[in-house]
Image (cartoon, helix red, strand yellow):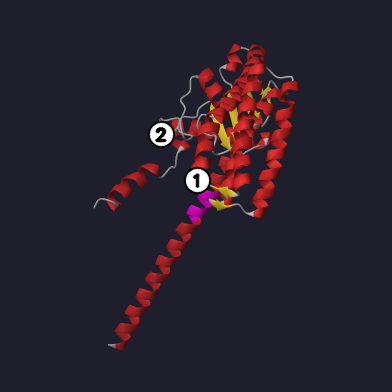
Amino acid sequence: MNEKKNEDSKVLSQEMIDENSSANFYARIISELNETFHHNYSQAISKSYQSLGHRHTPAIIVSGDHLTLYHDGKVEQELIIPALYQKVKSISHISFGIYVTLTNNGYGPLAEEVRTDLACQLELIDQGTAVLDHLDIPPEFVALQRATLKSAADILQDILECGVIEEERVQEFGRISAPLYLENAALAARLELSELHRVIGRWKAQVGSEDWHKIHVVICAAHQARYRETTKQYFQRIFHEIESLDANYENRVIYAEHIYDNEAALQLLARHLVDQKTSIALFGDRSRLQEDLMADGASAYLEVLFSD
């Protein structure tokens, strides 16, 4: 009886060893295949990257104040933010800055360090207002800037005199300053788009019709601006692309969040092109790899998890 038990135990142990060996072997095979995928994927991206900027693969990078064209093995850069743009757009930050300062203090008595900060801001605003009429900017811009500075000066004076930040007064400031804030931003957008349009008109003729239809644009900007970012709207209009909150509809216009380096932007474009070609081949859908591969499965299972 004991011999039979020993034999059965040996057989069971051997089966467990074989099972563990098979599992380990399979895991190693899958791991090697996965490494091979990543290696070949990196090679495809590298090949795509090396092709960018040559004939038939032109690219434009929008980053900061500059626009860069990569075409026919050459690189050309243009400044698209005129000097007046900074004067117009930056003044909108005054209202925003005051609101942030006030909320940092909180409603109630004014903290001494905040009082000092607000007094400094008021002094700068008074100095700016005094020289407005001597600036070389269009009269309609001067009037808007004067109104923006006045709304900021008024609330600072009120708070410094009474020494208290009242919620109702801050909300009133918001109602007055928000339209001015947006109007300044609209003027800044007009200035930027006018310069952008001038440069793109020249580049389009320079690149030629055939290559222009193959051009891609990468827009480097912040996360918060993704939806309806100014230059993105411009290029979407040119290339008849759809605005969206994500990457799903991106084709020739790609938005690069928090990338401010042209080389990194080109790397992103190279990956985008590889993914699009692969997505068409595997799924018959150009944009399927511009969302999580697990998205459909996740959505289906979430219906099960939350079916109650």
Residue 203: image x %, image y %?
Answer: 66, 16
Q: Residue furthest bottom?
A: 2
Give amino acid for label 2. Phe
Q: Which residue is mark 2?
A: 283
Q: Which residues are magenta?
A: 29-35
- Alpha carbon separation for disc pair 2 and 1: 55 Å
Q: For the N terminus, give its image quadrant.
A: bottom left
Circle 2 Cα neighbour tier, 10 Å, few/some/many (<14 / 14–19 / ≥20): few
Q: Which residue is mark 1?
A: 167
Q: Is residue 160 left or right of residue 238?
A: right
Q: Quadrant of residue 119?
A: top right
Identify the secondary structure beneath mark 2.
Answer: helix
Tell me the residue at 62%/31% (across/down): 150
- Residue appearing at x 59%, y 17% in the figure: 212
**Tally of numbered discs:** 2
In the image shown, does 43 or 257 lie closer to the viewer? 257
Q: Which element is circle 1 on?
A: helix
- Give the image location of residue 35, x and y in percent: 55, 50
30 magenta-colored: yes
Task: Say which of 221 and 81 sits in front.
Answer: 81
The reply to whether residue 48 is in sight is: no
Task: Kindly tell me whether residue 123 is visible in this rendering.
Answer: yes
Which is closer to the viewer, label 2 or label 1? 1
